[in-house]
């Protein structure tokens, strides 16, 4: 019987750090880490040195000082005595507003255009192709400033509405006024309002939420839930008996009837804009900057969404359509029950990145003076306080969080509709 | 068929009918119209609606386009010409005078007009330099040497100055190579590589300036220097776009490889960089370029604003490029990696010979669309005060002569961008078809 001898003990040599694959990866990583730390340290020391030369101590104390500028577009109470922090908060809310409005319109237009581009009608398909190519191949910033310039230059001034024989009149049953200062639309008012909910007390971030709005949302959500229960029950009956009870009026009713009752109870009415003095009073004033930004961003993004939708529908093999037709489904149900649910899985991931792009592109608001986070924190606050480092870094951080938030929410949704593979 | 109706069959044809022409409504123009435009009541309604829309748009645009205002010197002069023709209102007619007056400025900014040949030469030579890459089968292979020189030639043509600066920058590469050759024979390849890179970087950072200064004072050869603030118009957009994309492609490949690597720290750094850049808008990065980059650099450094913008645009594009290339790498079947390993190729050999050629081919549409996106995004530099076409358009619209101009000016700029971007997207489709080998 032979005895096993230990393999010769290999002594560690320095060159093994490079030539031995067991150690090489560690070596590379350590070198990369050291290089990165040196780079960071170099940048920080440069920054510290430069700031010292300029006599600026990096601090975020300026955020609590009074801002001293007005913001015309705001969702919450704000005046020029409010601190910079609140101005930034107003900016964040404006960014979120334009992102939400833009994503909604872009989705609607994009899906419509994408489906119409696949239309059998040659003329319609060509028109949609022209739309897509026109918007995709021209910079979004150009669209934004073009829309802004068109709104300002071509719409009539408020003074054109004055007099017995005015040059312009209000449109849509005397309710909407298109002027070069913006569009005035009726605003919802409640004569028996429930009041406001005050959040965060007296801190710089306090804001009010209308209880009327909350009540409406609650009623809508409850109605939607009941409507869903009815549909589930109808499904169960269909499974059991083969006949599907007609439920659409019931489902519509449980949503609409409580809503109408609530609106009547709250004393809902519309406040119409009216010309007083040099300008329109009353109603909701949608500023040119908001409209130009909204339309330009949505129509631009819609062109990309349309391509995604088209690609998604085309990715579903024709056999699916034929199989569904063989089962006796009508074309509309084929689209709704067979094609779209499958296409959605292809569509959603790139759609998420388009939503993210739209949100990031909303930072171009600064070109038309819409006061989003770029306009407030990284615009006027930066110029007034001279704190480039703090404001730009804070702004980047806010955008980063918004992007991450959107992608987390959308990925959660994507995971829900994803094909469950065996 | 069941036999229920068998007794109703009285007659069975036993000879073939002669072949007939298809009905006139099913073939030719009429058939095409019926099938594509009027196949049902919904389709017919859509067709009629579209026709009305097209008529409506054309009836506004065509008269507007054809208006004899080419020689007008101001907007009010345009309006007079149109009023003489009896045209009034917002869409009375285009005022083409502004384009005649300012098109040169929109193309070149404030570049000295007797030096226009330089940006034009740089632009034309760009295509010569790209030819070995774009149309490899139609041009001689020797041309690739010109492509290698072009990155040094272009800045010299655009900015001008002493010929010695680009020559000395090229000399840096030669020095690095010489050091590599000298050391790799004795001290090993890796050591040689590290030291040669260090030598080249030291040369570029500290020695290029003084040495080329001395050489220039001895043999002054050079062309007139043009300041960066004179750059503008499409020249600026194309410069930023081309330089940023050219540098971001190799950077993106490195980042993509880093993100897919097994080395945890390297991977973490790459993921952090990519996700950070992709999470913030380009405009914030341009703010960094215009306000912060000088703070991050050693005290006293003050480098050119266009250079700063190019740096940030490059970093921005490289993160998107990395994601596109990562997509291409992920789409390759695992067998390709295993095949390369089984041939005994090391990491870099397999990347260079097996993986990258295929991954890059798959990524072509993504790379081109990143380039188109970046080219469009160069308009953002107008926000930090550079005079790209949009920045110039603001200045033109503020001019007393042209105050109130909208469609003509933006239409012209949009058309130029459209031509570039549409052309590129069509080229990428052509390339995709050409490189299609039937399998992925």
Image (cartoon, coloured by chain):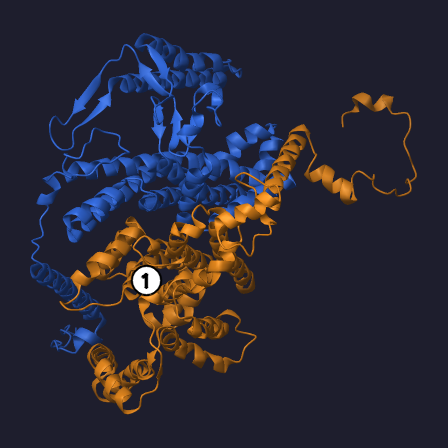
Chain colours: A blue, B orange
Side of A124 where B338 appears, left or right: left
User: Where is residue B128 shown, x and y percent of the image?
Assistant: 49, 75
Tell me the residue at 53%/17% (across/down). A242
Question: How many numbered discs sit on the rendered protein?
Answer: 1
Quarter of the figure that contains the N terminus of chain A: bottom left
Classify A412 as above or below B281.
above
Classify B197 as above or below B266.
below
Quadrant in which residue B89 is drawn? top right
Classify A401 as above or below A166.
below
User: Where is residue B108 shown, x and y percent of the image?
Assistant: 42, 65
Identify residue for label 1: B314
Q: Nearer the viewer, residue A272 or B33?
A: A272
Classify A314 as above or below A22.
above
Q: Nearer the viewer, residue A319 or B304?
A: B304
Q: Is residue A420 visible?
A: no
Name the chain letter of the residue that bears numbered label 1. Answer: B
Side of B26 where B200 appears, left or right: left
Quarter of the figure that contains the C terminus of chain A: top left
User: Where is residue B194 shown, x and y percent of the image?
Assistant: 22, 78
User: Where is residue A188 shown, x and y percent of the image?
Assistant: 34, 18
Q: Is residue B236 visible?
A: yes
Q: Nearer the viewer, residue A114 or B117?
A: B117
Q: Residues within 10 Å of mark 1 (few under 14, many from 20)?
A: many
Kind of element beneath mark 1: helix
């Amino acid at each position: 019987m032979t005895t096993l001898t230990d393999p010769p003990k290999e002594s560690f040599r320095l060159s093994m750090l490079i030539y031995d694959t067991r150690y090489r990866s560690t070596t590379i990583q350590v070198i990369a880490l050291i290089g990165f730390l040196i780079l960071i340290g170099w940048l920080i020391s440069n920054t510290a040195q430069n700031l010292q030369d300029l006599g600026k101590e990096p601090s975020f104390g300026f955020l609590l000082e009074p801002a001293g500028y007005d913001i015309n577009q705001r969702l919450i109470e704000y005046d020029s005595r409010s601190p910079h922090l609140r101005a930034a908060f107003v900016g964040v809310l404006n960014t979120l507003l334009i992102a939400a409005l833009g994503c909604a319109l872009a989705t609607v237009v994009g899906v419509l255009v994408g489906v119409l581009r696949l239309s059998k009608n040659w003329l319609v398909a060509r028109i949609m192709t022209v739309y897509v190519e026109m918007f995709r191949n021209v910079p979004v910033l150009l669209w934004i400033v073009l829309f802004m310039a068109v709104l300002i230059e071509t719409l009539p001034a408020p003074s054109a509405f004055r007099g017995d024989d005015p040059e312009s009149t209000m449109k849509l049953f005397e309710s909407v006024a298109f002027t070069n200062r913006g569009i005035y639309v009726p605003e919802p008012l409640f004569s028996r309002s429930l009041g406001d909910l005050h959040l965060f007390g007296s801190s710089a971030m306090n804001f009010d939420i209308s209880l009327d709005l909350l009540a409406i949302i609650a009623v809508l959500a409850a109605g939607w839930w009941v409507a869903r229960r009815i549909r589930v029950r109808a499904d169960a009956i269909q499974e059991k008996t083969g006949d599907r009870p007609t439920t659409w009026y019931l489902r519509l009713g449980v949503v609409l009837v409580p809503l109408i009752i609530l609106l009547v109870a709250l004393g809902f009415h519309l406040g119409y804009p009216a010309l007083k003095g040099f300008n329109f009073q009353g109603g909701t004033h949608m500023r040119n900057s908001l409209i130009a930004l909204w339309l330009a961003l949505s129509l631009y993004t819609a062109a990309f969404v349309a391509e995604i939708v088209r690609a998604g529908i085309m990715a579903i093999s024709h056999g699916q359509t034929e199989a569904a037709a063989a089962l006796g489904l009508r074309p509309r149900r084929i689209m709704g029950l067979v094609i779209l649910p499958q296409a959605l899985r292809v569509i959603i991931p790139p759609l998420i990145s388009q939503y993210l792009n739209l949100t990031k592109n909303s930072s171009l608001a600064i070109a038309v003076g819409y006061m989003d986070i770029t306009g407030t924190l990284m615009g006027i606050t930066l110029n007034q306080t001279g704190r480039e480092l703090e404001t730009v870094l804070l702004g980047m951080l806010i955008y980063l969080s918004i992007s991450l938030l959107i992608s987390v929410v959308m990925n959660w949704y994507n995971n829900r509709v994803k094909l469950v593979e065996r | 068929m069941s036999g229920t109706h068998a007794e109703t069959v009285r007659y069975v044809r036993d000879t073939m009918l002669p072949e007939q022409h298809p009905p006139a409504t099913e073939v030719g123009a009429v058939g095409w119209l019926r099938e594509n435009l009027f196949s049902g009541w919904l389709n017919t309604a859509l067709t009629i609606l579209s026709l009305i829309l097209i008529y409506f748009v054309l009836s506004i645009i065509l008269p507007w386009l054809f208006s004899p205002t080419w020689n007008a010197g101001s907007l009010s002069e345009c309006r007079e010409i149109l009023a003489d023709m009896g045209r009034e209102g917002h869409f009375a007619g285009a005022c083409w005078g502004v384009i005649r007056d300012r098109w040169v400025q929109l193309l070149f900014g404030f570049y000295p007009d007797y030096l226009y040949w330089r940006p034009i030469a740089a632009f034309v030579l760009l295509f010569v330099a790209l030819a070995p890459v774009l149309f490899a089968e139609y041009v001689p292979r020797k041309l690739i040497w010109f492509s290698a020189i072009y990155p040094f030639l272009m800045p010299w043509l655009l900015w001008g100055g002493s010929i010695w600066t680009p020559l000395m920058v090229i000399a840096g590469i030669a020095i690095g190579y010489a050091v590599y050759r000298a050391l790799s024979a004795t001290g090993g390849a890796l050591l040689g590589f590290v030291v040669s890179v260090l030598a080249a970087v030291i040369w570029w950072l500290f020695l290029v300036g003084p040495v080329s200064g001395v050489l220039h004072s001895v043999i002054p050869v050079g062309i007139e220097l043009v300041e960066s603030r004179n750059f503008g118009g499409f020249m600026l957009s194309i410069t930023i776009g081309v330089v940023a994309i050219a540098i971001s492609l190799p950077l993106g490949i490195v980042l993509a490889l880093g993100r897919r690597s097994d080395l945890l720290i390297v991977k973490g750094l790459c993921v952090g960089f990519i996700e950070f850049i992709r999470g913030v808008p380009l405009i914030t990065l341009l703010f960094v370029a215009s306000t912060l980059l000088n703070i991050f650099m050693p005290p006293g450094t003050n480098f050119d604003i266009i250079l700063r913008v190019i740096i940030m645009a490059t970093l921005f594009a490289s993160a998107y490029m990395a994601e596109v290339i990562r997509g291409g790498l992920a789409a390759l079947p695992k067998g390709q990696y295993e095949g390369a390993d089984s041939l005994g190729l090391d990491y870099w050999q397999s990347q260079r010979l097996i993986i990258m050629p295929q991954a890059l081919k798959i990524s072509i549409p993504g790379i081109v669309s990143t380039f188109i996106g970046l080219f469009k995004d160069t308009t953002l530099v107008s926000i930090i005060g550079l005079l790209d076409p949009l920045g110039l358009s603001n200045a033109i619209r503020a001019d007393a002569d042209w105050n109130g101009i909208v469609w003509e000016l933006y239409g012209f700029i949009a058309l130029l961008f459209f031509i570039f971007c549409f052309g590129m997207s069509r080229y990428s489709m052509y390339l995709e078809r050409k490189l299609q080998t039937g399998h992925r």
